[in-house]
Image (cartoon, grey):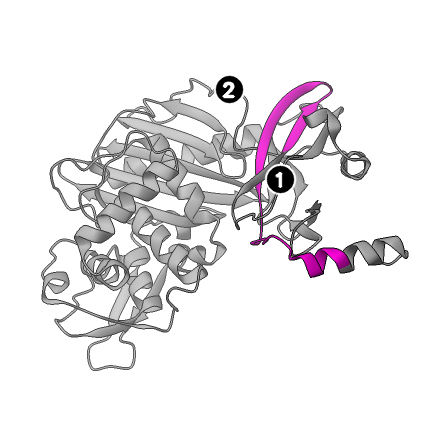
Amino acid sequence: MWKKMSCAVLALSLLLSAAGPAVWAKEEKPQQVDLAPNAQSAVLMDADSGEIIVNKNMDTKLPPASITKIMTMLLIMEAVDSGKIKMTDKVSTSEYAASMGGSQIFLEPGEEMSVEEMLKGIAMASGNDASVAMAEKLAGSEENFVAMMNERAKQLGMNNTHFSNCNGLPTENHYTSARDIAIMSRELLKHTGITKFTGSYQDHLRKDSAKPFWLVNTNKLVRFYSGADGLKTGYTSEAKFCLSATAARDGFRVIAVVLGEPNTKTRNAEVTKLFDYAFAQYSNFPIFKAGDALGELKISKGDVASVPLTATRSYSILMKKGESKEGIRHELQLNQDLKPPIAKGQPIGKIVVYKNNEVLTEYPIESPADVKKAGWWTLMKRSARSLFGGE
């Protein structure tokens, strides 16, 4: 089917002749380098391609503590970006949300804060109360929100995860793995606005009130490691000290996850070693930047004749430093049997990255818009324009 690609697609691949990253990447061959000897589990991932660089027991099911809130923040950001809620919307605190113990921003029953303020309280102060307040805002109850969390985890392929609450407080049947945490961290980072919260070291809530609340980020790496701008810490006596961290240098972003560390000093030191290893040994080969044109999808009987395809994020290939880039190319391969209606987000093809004739990785391409079936009048006008040389 792919051999029947149009000349336009072939021309595009020759013009761009670079390599594009993929979600259906080649078989992972992570390095067996124990850079986190004190962690029960660890993983180092290239954020662009999702390729695993270092693996230590990455699929072991463990309690994640407040790293749970990465999924909570993901659902919040998805709701904001889809227009379901706005950052300025007010969120009221229920008696139940205000009753949460552990890390909190000390919300009072009936107190209102904006979505942005609640998100700040979750990202920086790990507010259990703010997490529940947002869960109730989005789903009506924490129970409904947890169901959304588990459904989203399933969609992302987080096969060793089950959530029982939205904040990570100790409870039964609440677990995940280092790999799954990296997967949801990578998904959260697709919402570029999140690092405004996770990357800030200090800020205030209720700044102009009689009871201002000073926020200091629980992730000290955002202050002390160059390029670090997130994501989330966690601690309970059962989970011990956990961290999902991210850092970027020269357009190369990595995610490091450690679970079950004995203390914060060791946790931060071992994540630092993982970051240092990634930036010393690897780089990325950029294919597309967010906003770059990929080509266009032509639909002969759609209500629109074509849909422009644009990169929604940066795409790159993970490479060892010093590795030859010669022979790297990519092709945009669009499904040839697409017929309207086509739903926004529907798979329509893929970008395939090669080195010479070997497939390195593939990225799925989804429709950026809904395409309805054209009516007879639209088709007739289109045929007339074609017949008389119109566009």
Residue picked out by circle 2: 27
Q: Which residues are magenta?
A: 351-380
Tell me if mark 2 has few (under 14), some (14-19) or many (20+) residues whose alpha carbon lies within 10 angstroms of its own.
few
Depth order, front residue of 78/302: 302
The image position of residue 148, as x and y in percent, is 28, 48
Q: Which mark is residue 338?
A: 1
Quadrant where the C terminus is found in the figure: bottom right
Where residue 309 appears, x then y in whole percent? 66, 49
Above/below status of 358 relative to 278: above
Query: x, y (%) of residue 290?
Result: 62, 50
Residue at point 32%, 47% (across, down): 71
Q: Nearer the viewer, residue 237 or 81?
A: 81
Residue in front for this viewpoint, 366 or 375: 375
Q: Is residue 217 magenta?
A: no
**Which label belongs to residue 158?**
none
Amino acid residing under circle 1 = Leu
Q: Is residue 364 a member of the stretch shown in magenta? A: yes
Question: Is 345 drawn above or below residue 35 in the view shown?
Answer: below
For label 1, count other residues whose C-alpha is less than 10 Å away and answer few (under 14), some (14-19) or many (20+).
some
Coordinates of residue 244 in the picture (x, y in percent): 35, 41
Q: Residue at x 22, y 41 (%)?
A: 163
Helix, strand or loop at label 2? It is loop
Query: Nearer the viewer's eye, disc 2 or disc 1?
Result: 1
Residue beneath the point at 86% across and 58% down: 390
Drawn side of residue 363 relative to residue 165, left or right: right
